[in-house]
Image (spheres, helix red, strand yellow):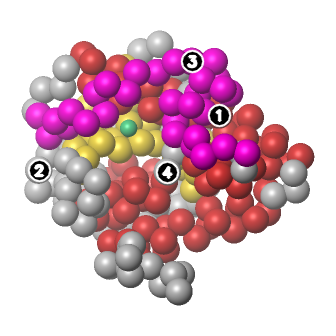
C-alpha cells in the first residue's frame, strides 16, 4: 500500500479505472462555508492518491475531468457532503456516483449504525482509526496520522460496495438505490442553495 500526495490537482495521465473511490476533507461540516482542503482517491488497488487543495483555488483540470467523466463511477461514503464540497470548490456536478451510506441505510434496516468505521469492520474486516477526523485539514503540511486517516477513508470502499451491492440485489432494492444515487448531485446542489435541514423541500 502506498499513499501519494499531490498539490492542487491529480498528475497528468494517472488512470484510476472505471470505479474511483473518493472522499474529501474540509474545514468543517458546512460545504457552503467551509473550504475544501483535501481530495482522496483510490482505484481499489490498495493505493491512495491525496490531492491538497489550496485556499482560493478554483480549478483542478485533471480532477474535474474525472469527476465529470460519464464513464467513471465515483464511489463515496455519504457522497451528499463530498459532492457538495466539490461543487462548491470547482463549480461542477460529480456524476455518476454510488454511495455506500445510502446503500447501507436501504438494506441494514436492523441497525442505525451506518458510519464508515462500523461498515468497514463488518464487511471489510478492517478497524480504521477516526482519531484524525476533526483535525485541521487546512494545514499546509499534513501529519502522517492525517495522511493515513485520509487514505483509509477511500482504500476499502470498493470492497464495501461489493458487499452492500450483493445485499441490495438479494433484497431487490438495487434499482431504488440507483435512483437515489442518480439524484445525489441534485441533493447536494439543494444543500448548497440553502434547502438543507430545516428547509429541506422533502419535509412537511
Ligand atoms: Mn474522510
Q: Residue at x 81, y 58 (%)?
A: 173
Residue indicated by mark 1: 160
* The image quarter in which residue 64 lies: bottom left
Residue denoted by label 4: 78
Counting from the top left corner in percent of width and height, residue 107 is at: 75, 49
Taking 95 as reference, is 51 above or below it? Answer: above
Identify residue for label 2.
55
Q: Earlier in the sequence, mark 1 or mark 4?
A: 4
Instruction: Tell me the mark number nearer the camera, choosing from 3 and 2.
Output: 3
Q: Are marks 3 and 2 in contact (CB under 8 Å)?
A: no
Above or below, 8 against 124 in this view is: below
Asked if one can make out residue 152 in the rendered structure from this viewpoint, the answer is: yes
Between 45 and 12, the residue placed more toward the observer is 45
Confirm if mark 3 falls within 8 A of ligand 1.
Answer: no
* Lower sequence index among marks 3 and 2: 2
Say few, some or many: other residues with alpha carbon within 10 Å of mark 2 (under 14 / 14 to 19 / 20 or more): few
The first of marks 4 and 2 along the sequence is 2
Q: Residue at (60%, 33%) from the top-left corner?
A: 119
| Residue under label 3 | 126
Disc 4, disc 2: CB below 8 Å?
Answer: no
Amino acid at each position: 500500500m502506498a499513499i501519494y500526495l499531490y498539490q492542487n490537482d491529480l498528475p497528468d495521465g494517472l488512470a484510476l479505472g472505471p470505479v474511483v473511490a473518493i472522499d474529501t476533507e474540509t474545514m468543517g461540516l458546512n460545504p457552503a462555508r467551509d473550504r475544501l482542503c483535501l481530495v482522496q482517491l483510490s482505484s481499489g488497488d490498495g493505493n491512495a492518491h491525496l490531492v491538497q487543495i489550496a485556499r482560493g483555488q478554483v480549478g483542478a483540470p485533471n480532477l474535474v475531468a474525472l469527476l465529470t467523466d460519464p464513464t467513471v463511477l465515483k464511489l463515496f461514503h455519504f457522497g451528499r457532503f463530498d459532492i457538495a464540497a466539490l461543487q462548491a470548490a470547482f463549480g461542477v456536478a460529480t456524476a455518476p456516483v454510488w454511495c455506500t451510506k445510502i446503500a447501507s441505510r436501504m438494506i441494514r434496516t436492523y441497525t442505525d449504525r451506518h458510519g464508515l468505521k462500523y461498515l468497514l469492520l463488518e464487511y471489510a474486516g478492517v478497524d480504521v482509526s477516526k482519531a484524525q477526523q476533526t483535525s485541521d485539514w487546512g494545514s499546509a503540511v499534513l501529519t502522517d496520522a492525517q495522511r493515513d486517516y485520509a487514505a483509509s477513508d477511500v482504500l476499502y470502499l470498493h470492497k464495501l460496495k461489493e458487499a452492500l451491492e450483493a445485499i441490495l440485489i438479494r433484497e431487490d432494492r438495487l434499482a431504488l438505490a440507483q435512483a437515489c444515487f442518480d439524484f445525489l448531485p441534485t441533493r447536494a446542489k439543494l444543500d448548497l442553495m440553502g434547502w438543507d435541514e430545516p428547509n429541506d423541500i422533502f419535509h412537511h
